């Protein structure tokens, strides 16, 4: 906890020191310059340093992204003129005060140099601002597949500083975006089962400080995974066993049916049956032969023509 607090204080101190150094260097160079720091979405009013009565006022804006913007005001004609300026930058007229430059809902595109040139009855005066726009990161905290907390500070400008409570080993990586913002991703890789499982990610940024907590230690995640895998394996084994039992009974049931089926017995024909089937025909033939022989003998004995014999 103490280390995280020290990191936040050190980060803020370094950032303020850099801004003050830039301001002092510009002033020592003989320019009436200032460093202006704004947060995305905020508004501000820029004024010109001047003496005497103004006759003309000109703002020249050189943003980091986009073209040059100019705004001109002439007192004698009470006219304003502007070229290629965004809608959230315009004049502000106040009673008894010289015109000022208003910036509403500032964005990253408005970051850059702002120069004012005032022509007065006492001479020309120059005022310069260097506008730095801060983008607060979007904080998100989640658990990865291994059950380790992962903290993300997305699209921050400058990059956010991440720390963990309780302290432990962590790995961090940065991803830069085209608009100048940076996403910082930190993974907490150490979790003690002897203490509470709640882990807190702390984000330190010039635009503010945030923190978020989550509970997802590897021990709990591993236990959950083991239980889930055990259930899946058990279900698979049960299904395989049931299929094997069904197949076994089906296979052996068919074999038992074949064994219990009585064999087909061919009819047995005895010699007696054959004799019984043939004997009536034999008897009939013998009778016919006897009758034929009797008629034949009678015909021969009487010398009759055979055509007149009965039965011929």
Image (tube, rainbow, N blue to C red):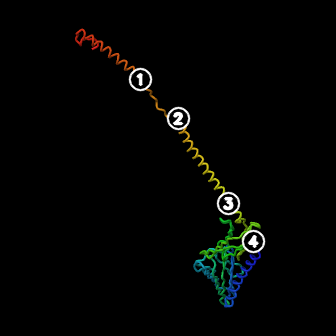
Mark positioned earlier in the residue sequence (3 or 1): 3
User: Which image quadrant: the N terminus?
Assistant: bottom right
Mark positioned earlier in the residue sequence (2 or 1): 2
Q: From mark 2 to mark 1, how far is it between C-alphas?
A: 31 Å
Q: Which residue is more in the foreground, 185 or 148?
A: 148
- For label 1, the residue is 275
Q: Is residue 219 above or below residue 159?
A: above
CB atoms at circles 4 and 3 under 8 Å apart? no
Q: From mark 3 to mark 2, how far is it between C-alphas?
A: 56 Å
User: Which image quadrant: the C terminus?
Assistant: top left
CB atoms at circles 2 and 1 under 8 Å apart? no
Does residue 104 appear anywhere in the picture?
Answer: no
Mark positioned earlier in the residue sequence (2 or 4): 4
Question: Where residue 278 sits: x, y (%)?
Answer: 39, 23
Q: Which residue is more in the foreground, 102 or 238?
A: 238
Q: Give the side of residue 268 with respect to residue 181, left or right.
A: left
- For label 4, the residue is 166
């Amino acid at each position: 906890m103490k280390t995280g607090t020290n990191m936040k204080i050190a980060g803020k101190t370094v950032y303020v020191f850099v801004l003050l150094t830039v301001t002092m260097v510009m002033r020592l160079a003989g320019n009436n310059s200032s460093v202006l720091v704004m947060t995305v979405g905020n508004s501000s009013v820029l004024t010109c340093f001047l003496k005497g009565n103004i006759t003309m006022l000109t703002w020249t804006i050189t943003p980091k992204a986009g073209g040059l913007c100019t705004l001109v005001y002439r007192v004698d004609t009470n006219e304003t003129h502007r070229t290629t300026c965004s809608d959230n930058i315009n004049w502000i007229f106040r009673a008894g005060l010289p015109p000022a430059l208003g910036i509403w809902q500032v964005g990253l595109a408005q970051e850059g140099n702002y120069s004012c040139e005032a022509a007065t009855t006492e001479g020309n005066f120059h005022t310069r601002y260097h506008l730095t726009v801060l983008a607060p990161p979007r904080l998100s905290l989640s658990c990865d597949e291994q059950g380790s907390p992962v903290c993300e500070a997305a699209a921050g400008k400058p990059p956010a500083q991440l720390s963990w409570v309780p302290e432990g080993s962590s790995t961090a990586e940065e991803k830069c975006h085209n608009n100048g913002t940076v996403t910082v991703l930190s993974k907490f890789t150490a979790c003690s089962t002897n203490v509470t499982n709640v882990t807190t990610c702390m984000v330190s940024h010039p635009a503010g400080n945030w923190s978020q907590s989550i509970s997802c230690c590897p021990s709990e995640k591993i236990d959950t995974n083991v239980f889930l895998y055990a259930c899946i394996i058990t279900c698979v084994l049960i299904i395989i066993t049931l299929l094997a039992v069904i197949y076994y009974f089906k296979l052996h049931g068919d074999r038992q049916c074949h064994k219990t089926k009585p064999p087909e017995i061919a009819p047995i024909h005895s010699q007696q049956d054959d004799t019984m089937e043939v004997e009536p025909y034999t008897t009939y033939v013998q009778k016919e032969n006897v009758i034929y022989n009797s008629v034949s003998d009678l015909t021969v004995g009487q010398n009759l023509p055979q055509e007149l014999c009965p039965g011929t």
